[in-house]
Every structure is written in C-alpha cells, then in structure tokens.
Amino acid sequence: LFLFVSCGNDDDTLGNSVKKNAFEGYARGSAVSFVIGDKAYIGLGYNSEDDNRFNDEYLLDFWMYDSASDTWHAIADFPGKGRTAAVGFSVNGKGYVATGYDGNSETKLKDVWEYDPTTNKWTQKDDFAGGGRYKSVGFAIGNYGYVGTGYGEGAVDKNDFYRFDPTAAAGKQWTKIQ
C-alpha cells in the first residue's frame, strides 16, 4: 500500500526556482563578490580565453546585479592586479575586495580596495595586516569587516583573523583578533 500526500498548490512560488537574466560578463572561475543592499557585485577571477580585457587571463572587470530590475550593469574596472581566490565583504554601503592570487607562484596579494557605488570608484585602503594570502574567508558584522584563514606565503595554511575598520585612520584600519 502506497500513500502519496501533497501539501500546497502549484500557484505557490515559495521554494520554487525562478529563472533570472544570465550574467553578462565573461565566464570565469574563482571570482569575488559582495552585496550592498539589494545589489550584488561580482568581478575578477580567471578565464583562459584570449581577450584583450584580460590581465594574463586574470580578469579586471566588475559587474552589478540589480535584483529589483533583474538587470546586469558593468561598473568601473578593478584598478589593482587581476586575481583569483580573493575575499569580498561590504560595510556601511561600500564593498571591499582583499587578498588573492595573481598567478605568480611567488606572490600572494595583500592589497585592499574599497568600492563606492555612489561614485563608481575604487580606492585603495590599508594592506591586509595578515600578509599576502588567498582562499581566505571574508565577511562583515556590524561596522567591521573580517578576513582570516587561507593559504599564505611560504605554502603555509593560516588560522588567524583580523578586523577591518573602514573609519579608522590610514595605517590603523586592521587589528589582529585571533
């Protein structure tokens, strides 16, 4: 004896997938992203296709997805080195991209960039105090960003964490917390 039971009706879209407009940028792996309000931002990453917008196959373009209008818009290109495995987070209406790998086996990146959606401009901030690394974890809580763990210089796995304060004076934006 089999009993089939169904709850709800077919008109209920809760839990159902809804197709949205496809990403309009180049296909890429190991991109970075952050969210500000109802807009998502994605960029950087790696694409092995030959194209003049690439920095040795490491992308510099960035895109904003507006969920209200289901549209993609190109924003200002990233001014730093193209990279993969970076971290992203947002604090106080601005997005941040930190760390990553640019394809040079000798170098892990530690630079930090702030994106302001009101001016569509990138500004370099204090370098990440934990040194160069990639495949880290980044997130925000309240008015601070946090970056930690990852793979650092000298082939060392990291287990530390740092807090980023975007309102602190230059040279004092990063504090080690673990």
Image (cartoon, grey):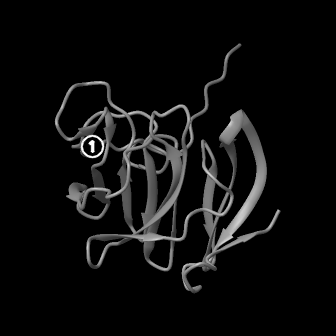
Which residue is painted at 66% across and 23% down in the image? Answer: 3
User: Residue 77, image x and y in percent?
Assistant: 26, 56
**From this viewpoint, which residue is outermost toward the front?**
106
Position of the N terminus, as image quadrant, is top right
26 left or right of 158?
A: left
**Res 73 visible:** yes
Q: Quadrant of the C terminus?
A: bottom right
The residue lying at 54 percent from left, 41 percent from top is 107
Q: Is residue 165 left or right of residue 115?
A: right
Q: Is residue 169 left or right of residue 24?
A: right
Q: Amino acid at mark 1?
A: Phe
Q: Residue at x 25, y 41 (%)?
A: 22
Reading the image, the residue beneath label 1 is 23
In this rendering, does residue 86 appear at all? no
- State whether residue 159 is above or below residue 48: below
Task: Choose top left, top right, bottom left or bottom right for residue 18.
Answer: top left
